Amino acid sequence: MSRDPDGVGGISDPDMSESESSTTASRRSFLKEGAACVVGACCVGVPAVAGLVAWLDPLSQDGSSGDVATRVATLNALPADGTPQRVTVVRGRSDAWTRDGAVPVGAIYLRKTGERAVQALHSMCPHAGCFVDYQAARGVFFCPCHDSTFAVDGSINDPHSPSPRGLDALEVELKGDEVWVRFRNYRTGIQQKVPVS
Ligand code: FES
């Protein structure tokens, strides 16, 4: 009996036949290649996973709970022609006792208004809180609850709209290629834009 010369591990048997020895060697070779593949896959997979986690992690936010900036998109992800893009705002929620991970807290529309300029509009109708849809064919936001419409910049364009104000604009900040938005809800049914605390 002698030490394994290839360093894979285990002990070799001098009485082993040539075919057994060859089978064992190829098995070892397979194991080595398999291990190399696993290590390689991990090396390639980690950056992709890290990117996804970074997107969903609470680190994609700054500020305190009432006034939080959240990373919501990249400039490249928004249509260059200014067509509004619906985006779900996801935040990590945690306090002294719980850490919920990423949870959706609302939805917004992002619209490029220039090379490096973005407008963010809350997707909730200020009349009674229904969600508006962007209708590309008509170029308007449509509220299904009372059949009213808003212009692409969020202003009221329906003279009979029961909404007391246009869609609520949200503060946008660009950090390099990233679009950050201070998402919050506003009271419905009143003319003034009053944050819900
Ligand atoms: S809820 Fe949108 S117009 Fe009434």
Image (spheres, rainbow, N blue to C red):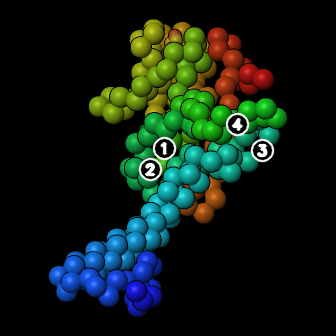
Q: Which mark is residue 78?
A: 2
Whether residue 117 is visible to the viewer of this picture, yes or no, is no
Q: Mark 1 = which residue?
A: 111
Q: Mark 4 = which residue?
A: 99
Query: Mark 4 or mark 3: which comes first in sequence?
Result: 3
Choose between 96 and 138: the one closer to the eye. Answer: 96
Choose between 156 and 58: the one closer to the eye. Answer: 58
Which residue is found at the position 36% from the left and 77% from the top? 32
- Residue sticking out furthest to the left: 19
Q: Mark 3 = which residue?
A: 63
Q: Does the CB distance between marks 1 and 2 fall below 8 Å?
A: yes
Task: Locate residue 40, reporting x and y percent.
Answer: 41, 72
Query: Mark 2 or mark 4: which comes first in sequence?
Result: 2
Give the foreground label among 1 and 2: 2
Q: Quadrant of the N terminus?
A: bottom left
Secondary structure under tag 2 reads loop
Between the residue at mark 3 and the residue at mark 2, the CA separation in whole angstroms equals 25 Å
Give the foreground label among 2 and 4: 4
Task: Locate residue 31, reporting x and y percent.
Answer: 34, 73
Between the residue at mark 4 and the residue at mark 1, the CA separation in whole angstroms equals 32 Å
Task: Locate residue 182, reporting x and y percent.
Answer: 68, 40
Secondary structure under tag 3 reads loop
Task: Locate residue 71, reporting x and y percent.
Answer: 61, 48
